Amino acid sequence: MLDHILGRPSPGLKRLEVLILASLTFAALKQSPSWPVLDKINKRLARFPPWKIVLGTLFALYLLNHTFLLCFLNAPEPLARMYTRNFYRATWVLTCLDAGFLTAMKIPFKPLRDFCSVAFSAMYMFFPDAADEKVRKFRALCSVEMMRTSWEKSLNPILRLLAYPQRGYLPIRRDITIPRPTPPSVSSFPGTKLGPITVRLYFDGAPEELKKCTSLILQVPGGGFVSMGPKCHDDYVSVWARKTKIPVVSIDYGKAPGSPYPWALEECFDAYRTITESNGEIVGLEGWFEVDGNGKRGKMKPPIKVMIVGDSAGGNLAASVVIKCLESKDIPVRPPSGLILIYPCLSFDLACWMPQEQLGLIRAESKMSLSMQSLVQAKETMDAFSPLAVPPAPKRIDVFSNKVQQSRTSLWRSLWRSQPRKQHAMVPKSLSMTSRMSYFTDRLLAPEMMRAMALMYLGGSPSPPNFDEDYYLSPIVAPDSILARFPKTFLICGEKDPFVDDTVIFGGRLRQAKQKARKEWESVKTRLGDLVVNAGRPHAHSKTATGRAPASTGSSESSESSGKVGRTFERVGLNGDDDEDEDSDDDSLPQTKILLGDLEIDIEEFQNHIFSKDPGDMVKTKILDGMSHAFLLMMSFLPEARQIAELTAGWISEIIDGGDAEVAGITSFEASNLTHMMMEDIEQQSSQERQGTQKPSVQGKAARKPQGLEEVSEKQILERQRMQLAKTHLK
């Protein structure tokens, strides 16, 4: 109270108040003054043993502290029915651990600090409100030390010992270093020496089995860009390694504020390049060539399949690494076979009101998945008498089947409701709030923490951040021409997560871009007519002076169509020239390329083009009712966390083992003129949609060369020929 009277809240004043009160009490007890009232009380209490007096006093204080609650005069509970029961119970444990670890944070002697952190956490289990208040005050003034202490609890030796049953044994779980790629990637920190990259390798098998692996999981761990290395994610990553039997490489990238944006992104991209360019040899796989027992090289091996997985801040970096792969021009970087994003942070926009186009994306996504209906309901309806109240969460959920067990309104609650309440008033579209604002009371991600993370990550950046256009920083604003080339992407997030909008909107934009790409591919297929259908059949042709085969002259229509788009063909050799050898006259060879006006189209490329894939198969979004952030880090006390780890492991196996794993994204380096043309059309359509105009009819477009293509250097041509020769050798 002393600090309130003086108008200066301060721990020092509160400490002084405690010392003054303790001194006065000690003096009174020592002098034992004779007061008639106290003498009467002493006589009445003399017949009770001391332990009863102490217990009775504590019980009286407890009742006094909860008087308003017993009289129904308490304040409303903002978290009532916000989460499922299991998730709320897990957040209670996590909050008590945070309070205990933050309380012991200043103890200098590490063994004592480790012990006291666990002991204080156990104490706070009995005082959850005090734990909430302690954590709230620490979060109000976030610091790097506070965030790392709170989020790196799993490094405590006592907790690691208790969590071992969840983590289990793996034959290979160790830290290694890998070098930077050669030639080096362009760096935003030209004056800084780039050292090797530390990664953590997980594999459920012997080193000999590791060498024979043909796929790899590259994990980008989360931690708000400021904390949590791979070791903090051991529990669920170990589950992936055991379930998939695939090696997992987790990147220990540089953390802010010491390594600001875009250091972590460039480090993750370099790690990906080093692994793919060595074909996994740098982490223990065989590499590009088979090796026999004598150490001699055998035949060349195909490229390994790499799956990128990222959670939270790692999801941001994982998506940005894919974008950097797709945009690579000077150096060929094979894109990953798939991408999984777990409660990712994909935007740094801390806006309150949701734009109508994003709300439309969420509605469209909800029609694709039943798990999003509660999210749409929260956006579009409200309690007219309590507009900030969130829809009640189910009692429990089943991750695999999407079944939920709803909580029932108790008879006691219905009897005490004073008047009928209108529960479903519609929210005007312009007043729909973003998830960052809707769930600002989240127990795990407070607004202060998100603001502190953004300032630490971006404060030391060599260039000022551009939230509207920098899609390396905010992948959610990437253009459609890039999103259309993404590999198969699966996303998962909690319904009450402040980042749930990022997940749904990014998934919706991916699906929308791939739908546009599919329409462009179908329009080209229509213009090509039956040529693609008959592409694999032998085509009798007679060469002209230019090497082109004229169309059949069996009818005037065919003769007339010989000058039209898509009615001329040619057989082209591996290097792009006409085959002039004796085998070129063999009519049994199937045609391999088609001319679409001035564009030369490879038939196999066109038929297996990533734009031809069904958008519904390429993008999957799953929202978990009644759950928030960081559920994979709660495997020791959240039953659903084990289910989610197994579910994502199944996703990894599905993508790696599926046929679409062979159809990775298309980089700018290897994009053909056809791909560039379709990308241009996608961007033109997106631009016209933003301007509110309609796209002209596809059938009315004339075949043309894509505008604004960069000149292909001799180095790129030679590199493409080398890659084609390698593919032919592998066949």
Image (tube, rainbow, N blue to C red):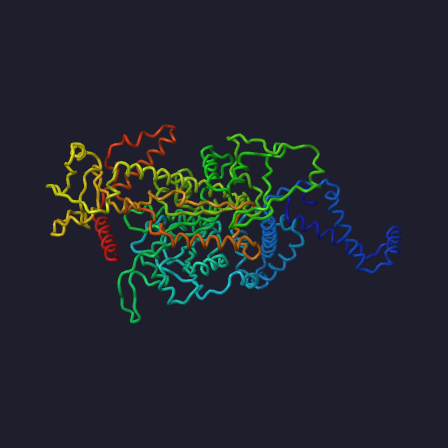
Instruction: State left or right for residue 619 relative to residue 142.
Output: left
Quadrant containing the C terminus is bottom left
Front residue of 174/518: it is: 518
Front residue of 241/199: it is: 241
At horizontal 33% and vertical 36% (from top left) the residue drawn is: 683
Residue 18 x/y as whole percent: 70, 51
Residue 151 x/y as whole percent: 53, 53
At horizontal 60% and vertical 41% (from top left) the residue drawn is: 392
Instruction: State left or right for residue 471 relative to residue 89.
Output: left
Quadrant containing the N terminus is top right
Residue 379 x/y as whole percent: 53, 36
Residue 355 x/y as whole percent: 47, 33
Query: Is 436 situated above or below 688?
Result: below
The residue positioned farthest toward the bottom in the image shown: 294
Instruction: State left or right for residue 284 relative to residue 99.
Output: left
Number of disc labels: 0
At horizontal 70% and vertical 41% (from top left) the residue drawn is: 411
Instruction: State left or right for residue 420 relative to residue 424.
Output: right
The residue positioned farthest toward the top in the image shown: 693
Front residue of 630/54: it is: 630
Can residue 39 be spotted in the picture?
yes
The residue positioned farthest toward the front in the image shown: 554
Query: Is 299 situated above or below 366?
Result: below
Can residue 336 be spotted in the picture?
no
